Image (spheres, grey):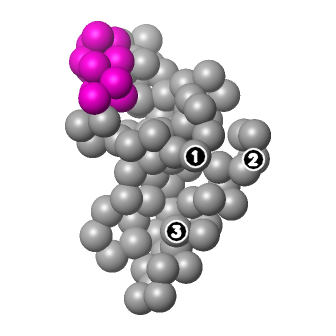
Amino acid sequence: KLGYLYSQRGAWEAKQLISEKWIAEEEKNEFSFGKSPVDGVFSKGGMRGQMLLYSPSKNFAAGWHSYTTDGRSKGLLECTCRLFE
């Protein structure tokens, strides 16, 4: 839901919950979400393998959980980002 909220520029069911200005500032300065290898796609990882990926220009958001100790979850992020290339 968070990824969808960000991909919709802070709007949820026709209500503005987060200002568009805040989202733009957060993306610009990478406060919470970092830029992915693909332009216009943002990602955030959490503890124990939680991942969130969203793209306003593609109207797309996805979240998943894939905890590994050998770094394989990073490969899933890279693979998902290739969908937008």
Residue type at mark 3: give it.
Lys
Classify the position of the C terminus by image quarter: top right
**Badges 1 and 3: C-beta atoms under 8 Å apart?**
no
Q: Separation of disc 2 and disc 3 at Cα?
A: 15 Å
Query: Quadrant location of residue 75?
Result: bottom right
Mark 2, residue position: 83
- The residue segment tinted magenta is 16-29
Q: Nearer the viewer, residue 35 or 10?
A: 35
Q: Is residue 75 left or right of residue 16?
A: right
Nearer-the-camera pick, 30 or 57: 30
Please indicate, yes or no, whether residue 66 appears anywhere in the rendered image. yes
Task: Indicate whether residue 28 is drawn in magenta.
Answer: yes
Q: Percent position (x, y) of residue 5? A: 41, 30
Task: Say which amino acid is labelled 2.
Answer: Leu
Residue found at x 62% / y 22% = 57
Q: Position of residue 40 (x, y in %)?
A: 56, 29
- Does 74 lie within the magenta span? no
In the picture, the disc for residue 74 is 3
Q: Main secondary structure of the magenta part?
A: helix
Residue drawn at (34%, 24%), measured in percent from left and top?
28
Badge nearest the viewer, 1 or 3: 1
* Number of numbered discs on residues: 3
Seen at 34% across and 12% down, the residue is 20
Quadrant assignment, res 15: top left
- Looking at marks 2 and 3 on the same chain, the residue that comes earlier in the sequence is marked by 3
